[in-house]
Amino acid sequence: MEFLLVVQEELPADDFQDSASYYGIEDVVTELVEFLRSEGETASDNTPRWEEFETLASDYEVDL
């Protein structure tokens, strides 16, 4: 999942959301940012289950 790269590189949410706005995907990115900030408590159809995300992060050695 590309979102793991955002986590790994510790990209500032504001920069990430500015880029999302440029590409017209700010709604999806906002959901992903909230998903990460809330550790899966805020989820949507565009986000995985938190447990799945944790497993994937672990597989790629990305600290959440």
Image (cartoon, grey):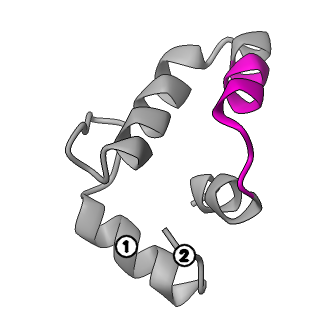
Q: Nearer the viewer, residue 59 or 37?
A: 37
Q: Position of residue 39 (x, y in %)?
A: 31, 53
Measured as percent of width and height from the top left, residue 2 is found at 64, 55
Numbered disc total? 2
Specify the quadrant that holds the N terminus: bottom right
Secondary structure predominantly adopted by residues drawn in magenta: helix
Mark sitting on residue 46: none
Which span of residues is magenta-colored? 10-20
Whether residue 35 is in magenta: the answer is: no
C-alpha distance separating marks 1 and 2:
9 Å
Could you tell whether 64 is left or right of 51 in the image? right
For marks 1 and 2, the one nearer the N-term is 1
Q: Which residue is at a point 50% across and 75% down the rendered structure image?
A: 57
- Mark 1, Cα crowd under 10 Å, few <14 / some 14-19 / many 20+, is some
Answer with left or right where residue 60 lies relative to residue 31: right
Q: Which residue is mark 2?
A: 63
Q: For the residues labelled 1 and 2, say whether their Cβ atoms are less than 8 Å apart.
A: no
Q: At x 42% / y 48%, what residue is drawn? A: 36
* Residue 20 drawn at (x, y percent): 70, 22
Location of residue 50 in the rendering, given as x and y in whole percent from the top left corner: 27, 60
Q: Residue at left 49%, top 36%? A: 33
In the rendered image, the vertical position of residue 48 relative to residue 23, given as above or below: below
Q: Is residue 31 left or right of residue 44?
A: right
* SS under mark 2: loop
SS for tag 1? helix
Q: Nearer the viewer, residue 12 or 2?
A: 12
Please name the amino acid that badge 1 sits on: Glu
Give the number of the disc on residue 54: 1
Is 13 within the magenta? yes
Establish if 62 lies above or below 49: below
Q: Amino acid at mark 2?
A: Asp
* Residue in the image at 60% along x and 83% along y: 60
